[in-house]
């Protein structure tokens, strides 16, 4: 997959659209809410999901999934990894849990380390 997931879920104004993301992953807006730690009401209203915080969380999700696509082979496996792969370096927390805790820098550092041949 050469196309970024972000390219698929972004609108003409440059905002990640939660409904497009749900459609891309064949899931619901409620599930996207769970993935990002954002409330359903935030994701279901344009004036809320375009906020800086909401867009940061949505973009973080897509960035992690895009980064692990080469390891997993497709977006659906990457989505599953994001949700369920326990990262030993973080006491068994998943990338999803770390992103929800606003620890995106730690996730990126972990992915960089692993990509460069470091052990997980």
Image: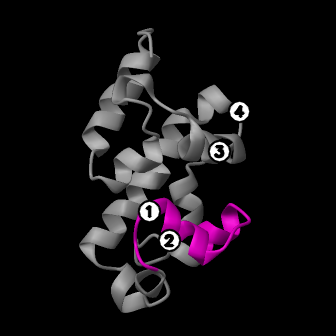
Front: mark 3 or 4: 3
**Side of 35 relative to 27 (left or right):** left
Image: magenta residue range: 20-39
Q: How far is disc 2 from disc 4 in space, using C-alphas?
A: 25 Å
In this view of the protein, which residue sits in the foreground, 2 or 22?
22
Q: How far is disc 4 from disc 1 in space, using C-alphas?
A: 22 Å
Q: Tell me the residue at 44%/42% (across/down).
A: 95
Q: Say whether marks 1 and 2 touch (CB < 8 Å).
A: yes
Q: Which residue is mark 3?
A: 80
Q: Tell me the residue at 40%/58% (across/down).
A: 59
Q: Which residue is mark 2?
A: 33
- Report x, y in % for residue 43: 46, 80
Q: Which residue is mark 1?
A: 36
In the image, is residue 54 above or below residue 68? below
State yes or no: residue 64 in magenta.
Answer: no
Q: Which residue is mark 4?
A: 73
User: Hey, which quadrant is residue 74 in on the image?
Assistant: top right
Dot 3 or dot 4, earlier in sequence = 4
Q: Secondary structure at mark 2?
A: helix
């Amino acid at each position: 997959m050469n196309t970024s997931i972000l390219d698929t879920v972004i609108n003409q104004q440059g905002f990640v659209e939660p409904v497009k993301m749900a459609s891309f992953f064949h899931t619901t807006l409620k599930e996207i809410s769970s993935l990002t730690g954002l409330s359903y009401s935030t994701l279901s209203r344009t004036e809320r999901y375009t906020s800086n915080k909401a867009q940061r969380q949505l973009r973080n999700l897509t960035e992690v999934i895009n980064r692990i696509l080469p390891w997993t082979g497709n977006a659906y496996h990457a989505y599953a990894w994001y949700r369920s792969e326990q990262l030993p370096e973080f006491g068994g927390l998943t990338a999803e849990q770390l992103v929800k805790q606003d620890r995106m820098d730690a996730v990126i550092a972990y992915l960089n380390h692993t990509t460069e041949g470091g052990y997980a």
